[in-house]
Amino acid sequence: MKLILFILLFSMSIYGFAQEFTGDWKGTIDRRGNKLDLIFHIVNDRGKLATTLDLPIQEKKGILFDNTVINAKEITISSSKMSITYVGVLENDQLVGSYKQSGMESPLTLSKLENKLPGNKALPSSEEELQALAAKDNGNYKYKVEDYFAKPKASSFQLSPDGKYMSYQEKDANLKNHVYVKNIKTREVKRVIEEKGELIRRYAWVNNNHLIYIMDKGGNENYHLFSVKIDGSANKELTPFDGVKADILALLKEDPDHIIISMNKNKPQISDPYQLNIVTGEFQQLYKNENVETPIVDYDFDKDGNLRGYTKIKDGVITQYFYTKDGGETFSLIKEYGMEDTFEVLQYNYSSKNPDDAYVLTNLESDKAEIQLYDLKLNKPIKSIFSNDDYDVSDISLSRKRGYEIDCFIYEGDKKEIVPQSKFFKNLDQNIRKQFTGYQYRIIGVTDDESMYLVVVTSDKVVGKYYTYDPEKNEFSFLYDLMPQLKEEDMAEMRPIIFKSRDGKTIHGYITLPKATSEVKKFPLIVNPHGGPQGVRDHWSFNPETQLFASRGYATLQVNFRISGGYGKEFFKSGFKQIGRKLMDDVEDGLQYVINEGLVDKTKVAIYGASHGGYAVLRGMEKTPDLYVCGVDYCGVSNIFTFMSSIPAYWKPYIKIIKGYWYDVDDPEEKIIAQEVSPVFHIDKIKKPLFVIQGGNDPRVNINESDQIVEALRKKGFVVPYMVKYDEGHGFHKEKNQIELYQTMLGFLIENLK
């Protein structure tokens, strides 16, 4: 008995020491003046210690060691293959020791890192499990996943205001997308922004000498703003505040050293406007947004940086527009409207002698949003200048050089439409359309003197080809094809469709069909509800997801269900408090339409979506459990109650509006509905395989939403593959992660849909 007790105590002692050593440890060694961070991950694998190593600067993770041995307070970690040995002694929560590699020895003290990974870390599938699933996509296909989702070698082309330089992002061998500036005359190229651990989310020219760019941390959407000179010098962070989100409100052509930004620096729920000097980094608060209960949620500045108007939220659901009639001394309420309405100042009419004239996008007097010339001081429309009977108008373009005359109007029907107005733009539009018949185009840049335009040409089969255009010479110069590896003739057609819902609504959408073969007459189908859902819609364009699916023989259905944007106020409003109900009916009716048209195999239908689309996957699989053979949920809401309670602080002013679109869980009647349409409460109805994908730092749909559904289904006995990336937020944006996601998804679809 004493021997048994001694053995038990001894094993408990060893186990106790093992527990002290397990976890993540970080330290830095000095190699010839270069600092190298090392992160050791020590785990207890069924009673045996195992160690892996990360080298952040080289972006290497999971380097496996042969042996991990502890002796009292000492640990030895070694790899014969790499000729590495680390010996450290545990002293006050640190490992103090030495690191030897290939005959070189350096002192190395490791400090334990607190594990701050979000969510239940025991739930995600192992890399081996996910790789095994991905390996099932092993057919002899012409194109690989990388062909669709590897970021272009070069992208994000922009012209400097004076036209002397062109900037762009270029990818290196480590998949980093740095920003370069090219002198158009001398052809000299300089790298001005280096992308390191975090993605450069956006960048832009502020003036002829400076660029600005935005980054966050791991997808948390707390964006920080930086500036840099075009020679790469004076790279500085302009908003160095932890936990603060910065956004750009206005670039000032008339004051090129300044921009106007917003920051939630004073209160996390609301943002204040600041004038920021991008050269010195100095900023000045322009207005105080003090009331969290009735916050300002948007600001309108004119071209000179003067605050002319702002938008407030009253009682959580009423929008109020305030305008100054005395140069900013006071602001008066001129409009009050509901969450289905629009009143937005697009541009001030600088061609008018009346400083209060503006071009306003509004649907206050119509179902479809139209553009009006509006006198803001008198608070009345002067005239309607553009509308469409079937679709909301979206934008207007003016020429700064030609006295702010109207160049064109823009709206989106089945495809994006540009409607020329000025004589100059009619000629430009005609020349572009003649050169690129059958394609869409967008003007994404123009020099201040309008002597050079940057044009991108697209279609459902072409992701984007860049050209510069000289209007005086009517000359196009080819610049770059974003995805030359994808041949247009191999891509699938995206067809607009129109059908009637079961309650009589006209619903628009798209179906992408693989090229027909003699063997396949009806295709297996992936139903792909869009995110949002409010105000968002699917578009006719090159879609790498639908093209990838088509390359594997799958059709894709995208339905712009009620509450989608662009189809008028009544259509939008008809989706309020119908998420998970009539929105799903519209998706199902779209599916029945393409089945009736003889396009797809009704016995082979999967459902896949992200964000609200991920919610629709879960809801569809329990609402109509026999309709789909499998589902892929990508950062989807599973529980409306926890979703509402976990929204980020800067969404708090919109919480009643969000509840107006979704459901008010504090209202007894709506609480019942919210429970009825929250998939996590109906696990027993889900019968088909599910694959779940989630970003660990997602601020919109918290990782808990995915954890809940995975844990509940596994308790029921389901095998649920679960991919989590802890360096991503709402959706995956890093190339490596995107490619892994779609490789694994294809394996899952092959296993369950084909």
Image (cartoon, grey):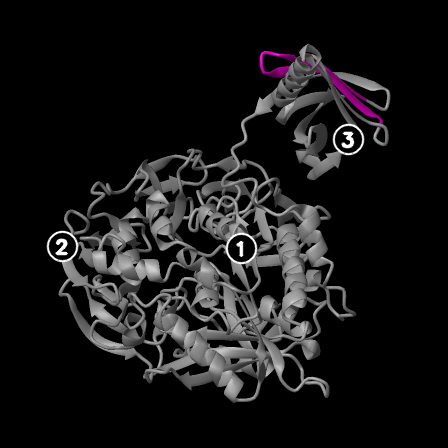
Any magenta on residue 573? no
Magenta residues, start to end: 83-100
The residue lying toward the viewer, choosing from 379 and 582, is 582
**Mark earlier in primary sequence (3, 2):** 3
Nearer the viewer's eye, disc 2 or disc 1?
A: 2
Local packing at callout 1 (Cα closer than 10 Å; few below 14, some 14-19, many 20+) is many
The residue lying toward the viewer, choosing from 546 and 454, is 546
Q: What's under tag 3, amino acid-wise?
A: Phe
Count numbered badges in the picture: 3
Residue 566 visible somewhere in the drawing: yes
- Using the numbered discs, state the Cα–Cα distance from disc 3 to disc 2 in whole angstroms: 69 Å
Q: What's under tag 2, amino acid-wise?
A: Ser
Relative to residue 452, is residue 296 depicted above or below? above
**In the image, is 685 to the left or to the right of 137?**
left
Indicate which disc residue 65 carries: 3
- Using the numbered discs, state the Cα–Cα distance from disc 2 to disc 1 in whole angstroms: 39 Å
x 70%, y 46%: residue: 174
Where residue 490 sits: x, y (%)?
70, 77
Local packing at callout 3 (Cα closer than 10 Å; few below 14, some 14-19, many 20+) is some
Indicate which disc residue 160 carries: 1
The residue lying toward the viewer, choosing from 164 and 250, is 250
x 57%, y 84%: residue: 434
Nearer the viewer's eye, disc 3 or disc 2?
A: 3
Indicate which disc residue 319 carries: none
Indicate which disc residue 332 carries: 2
Secondary structure under tag 2 reads strand
